[in-house]
Image (cartoon, coloured by chain):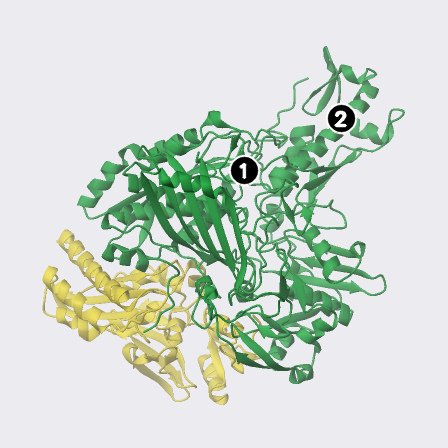
Amino acid sequence: MYPSRFSYDAPTSVEEAVAILDQNGGEAKVLAGGQSLIPMLKLRFASPARVVDINGIPGLEYHSIDADGTLRIGALCRHEDLEFSTILGNFPTLAQAASLVADPIVRTRGTFVGSLCHADPQGDWSATMIALGGKIIAQGPNGRREIAASDFVLGPFVNALAFNEIAVEATVPPAKGKALGGYLKLERRVGDFATASVAVALDVDGDVVTRAGCALAGVGGRTIDANDAISVLVGKTLNEESIKEAAEAVAAAAEPRTDHRGSSSYKRHIVETFVTRILSNIANSEQKAA
Amino acid sequence: MAPLDELKIGGMGASRRRVEDNRFIRGKGRYVDDIVLPGMLHVEILRSPVAHARIKSIDTSAAWEVPGVRLVMTGETMAARNLAWMPTLSYDTQAVLATDKVRFQGQEVAAVVADNPYIARDALDKIVVEYEQLPVIVNPIQAQSPDAPLIRDDKENQTSNKIFDWEIGDKEATDRAFAQADVVSKIDLHYPRSHPSPLETCGSIADYDRSSGKLTVYMTSQAPHIVRAAVAMVAELPEHMIRIISPDLGGGFGNKVPIYPGYVISILASILTERPVKWVEDKSSNLISTGFGRDVYLEGELALRKDGKILGMRMHTISDHGAFFADAQPTKFKIGLMHSAFACYDIPAAHLVSEGYYTNKAPGGVAYRCSFRVTEAMFFQERMVHAAANDLGMDQAEFRRVNLVGDDMFPYRTAFGFLTDSGQYGKCLDVGLEAIGYSTFKQEQEEARKRGKLLGIGISTMTEPLGAGNSREYDIIGIKMFDSAELRVHMTGKAILRTGAKTQGQGHETTWAQIVAHELGIPADDIVVEEGDTDTAPFGMGTYASRSTPVAGAAVAMASRKIRAKARKIAAHLLEVSEEDIEWELGRFYVRGNQERGVTIQDCALAAYSNVPDGLEPGLENTSYYDPPNLTWPFAAYFCKVEVDAQTGVWDVLNFVAVDDCGVRINPMIVEGQVMGGLTEAYAMANMQYITFDEEGNCIGANYMDYLIPTSWETPGFELHEVVTPCPHHPIGAKGVGECATVAGPAAFVNAVMNAIEHTGVRNVDMPLMPNRVYEALQTGKNISGMPPVLSD
């Protein structure tokens, strides 16, 4: 478990970090929480010439909510900051996923944005971000640009960043009306990657769904964008019939493969079961509240 | 004068805090990888990427060019010193560095010795090996085929992949039992390949000093004295010039009993470079190349009378040993103590037939936290019993009660010839049934089913043979399985104790001192315990198979008693009475009839060095060798209650009750820790763990993302109970316990899940009971057999 030789940089500003990436033409990797990069270096799955450690850049640890309700998550916000956050009340999908990411040790160090950039098809946060219609803010030599979460993951372990860009922030828009949602994950053990997981995010006006978002992890070559599939709920109330219709539509959008975690049909069944459970839980708790 | 309070001096029965933890929790443990010697070099090993291939060529020239590289070794380097092959603990041979073929993925092919491990690792990438791939065998069923490629073409007279045929028991008597049976119940199981995966991997630092001819090896070994003997034989070095030091070990679980190529490579590298050479493998190397556990097909049947009495048992095992037969086990028994199956049940006749095969998988069927295949034996036993009770329509607890050996039947000769000597099996069963709430469970289960919930309860009861030897029957490569202790009491009454065992988490530094405290009344805190250095410790066979308390622990008691006998002579001298007039109470001799007039053991220790009676040798030391008259036979009764999620196949443990009778408990806290640790490993095997291979022999389970170690998050809680039946032949009445929970645990979990789902008609789901397998069984009502397939679509 000894990595190849690499140079190490510890810039103190995003501009400096971007300049190093720019000068190294794709031979440099950004180190944030290191929970994926360090193992990959040790296994020599990755052998970058330079490692650009952004942990010394001040002011990136935040997560905060704007006056309009937009959630902003900085590049060095750790998983556990979100797990123990007190301001995620309007983001139940994120709040539920936060304690299911990896294990407690990884959560102390790993970062939300880093996890998005890693673009693991089994990663939890990418699914929540796609379901919530979030965005990633990339900073390069020519300034900043926004990338929709659903356009950010291009394939397994491939994101939409250019070699000289750093993902400095993720943003999640506020719900129109009431925000409801949930996250369920089947894993063989705490810290395991998902056999299948489902993120659901709904905007509800009264008891009518005005926006429905859904994404899946572990059941495809990349995070599955199931926003179209779950849009069958828009304009409807949650009831046995609409929940069944949505669950079937989402399950059909999954692209699971058979492997040692289970057959493709089993994984599709889990997706359907989890969508049903999340939506039924929402319907039940809303009923109780009313 | 008030007698000493044994619990206050940390004697028997005290839950004394573990002495060793003080340094471990402060990061002051000293493991092999912590040791740095002046001028030390580092070795990294190149492993085969393929499972079966002829080596056409190895080009190491570019590796030699890497700055900082001191030596590049191949099979040729080893062969020049007659070290290309080494003997295994099962009288086979194993390649150190491959010369002809590679026979499993991960096999050692070449090694680089360099100034630091980074350089060595870089240089490995520069070695070019040309392989000619051969057909691959990944299970013993394939190995049986007449068309199967011959894996061990290096061995003369080896014409097939079969390693052994072995049988034990009375075939005719068993056939007669089956002829008389009302009901015959069958079961067909697979116990998947697992791995002990200690937190610390294997490693060594070899330090050969040409000027003195002395070879010192720091090594992760559970049995350093066996290693010294083996190195003397393999490396042809004189035994007195070999010193094996096993420092702190970060777990062993059987994985650190065998001798691995890395050890031999570091030794030769040190001899060739005349520098200390360190080898420490990474986790993946440990998982893919070192001693695994299990990997056995278990099939059998019971002959049953309608009233529930078992008349006879047949058992057939087919085991997969990988490319080299490197099992660590007593010589006489080819499939370990598999014939301990059904030892707790009164069955008149039994017959076991075993076949072992070579495959293109890693070698080394070690006793993973078990006494040589006892885990497989007891898993088969309790799954078989569960199926038989169901086939008879009998209650699980009642069926066991009918067949368990009764308290009045000891000593009891089992159908396979073991002699069990003590136990209260029925009492253990009752304690557990009460604790789990068995009497109301069936009603609870029915009501839950009406609400769509699937509840199940599973029982596992067993006695297992722990503490090999005796030496008449037990040896490893000819070395008899006794053990030893050396106790030196200093002038001020403090003492140092050394044994031939080697602690690796069991807490010997704590518990051995408690035995001395019990025997001599010297406070446990006044006794330091040392193990693992062959230059200082007396000869012993090491720690595995739960043998240390039964054997080395007994030696500690015997050494203490011999010291007490000598101290008695000194006491008589000090008290100016004859030895016959001396009485002993804990820590003190006194004159019979006058309890006030006495001397302490500390007084005697001082006198041993300052005021010795005429005719007595000075000093207060003893070395005892202990050859046990029999194995010890602890009993375990485990009860597990689960709820299965019918929609996902996920199962949760609602309650787990463990009743252990390991005889007299030296340190109850340590016993409880051992049981909890073992149950955690049992849960892992039942729930999530396996190492499998695809058709090309690629190992699935070569890292901790695929091979799962449970964490405290998903491991259930365990409720522990005790019953104490002292061992009749052990000096302090103790029995082994370290492995009971790993051995009896898996069947309790599996029986519980099966009880929850067998109303669908399914009879067996093989381990691991992963959610997808349980769900499939529930949906189809069909058995799920064998390893989880490595499929893709």
* Residue at the image position 27 percent from the left and 59 percent from the top: B776
* Dot label at residue A72: none
* SS at badge 2: helix
* Percent position of residue A166, x then y: 41, 80
* Chain-order first, disc 1 or disc 2: 1
Most distant residue in the right direction? B614
Q: Is residue A105 above or below residue B578?
A: below
Q: Is residue B793 above or below residue A198?
A: below
Determine whether, in the image, residue A283 is placed left or right of residue B583: left
Name the colour assigned to chain A in the rendering.
yellow
Determine whether, in the image, residue B542 is placed left or right of residue B319: right
* Residue at the image position 41 percent from the left and 66 percent from the top: A78
Q: Foreground residue, B344 or B483? A: B344
* Percent position of residue B5, x then y: 62, 25
Query: The chain shown in green is which?
Result: B
Q: Which residue is mark 2?
A: B565
Give the mark count. Answer: 2
* Percent position of residue A229, x then y: 18, 73
Q: Amino acid at mark 1?
A: Phe
Label 2 CA crowd tier, 10 Å (few <14, some 14–19, many 20+): few
* Residue at the image position 69 percent from the left and 48 percent from the top: B479
* Percent position of residue B642, x then y: 32, 46
Q: Amino acid at mark 2?
A: Ala
Q: Foreground residue, B273 or B146? A: B146
* Dot label at residue B418: 1
Pointer 1 with pointer 2, Cβ within 8 A: no
Q: Chain of mark 2?
A: B
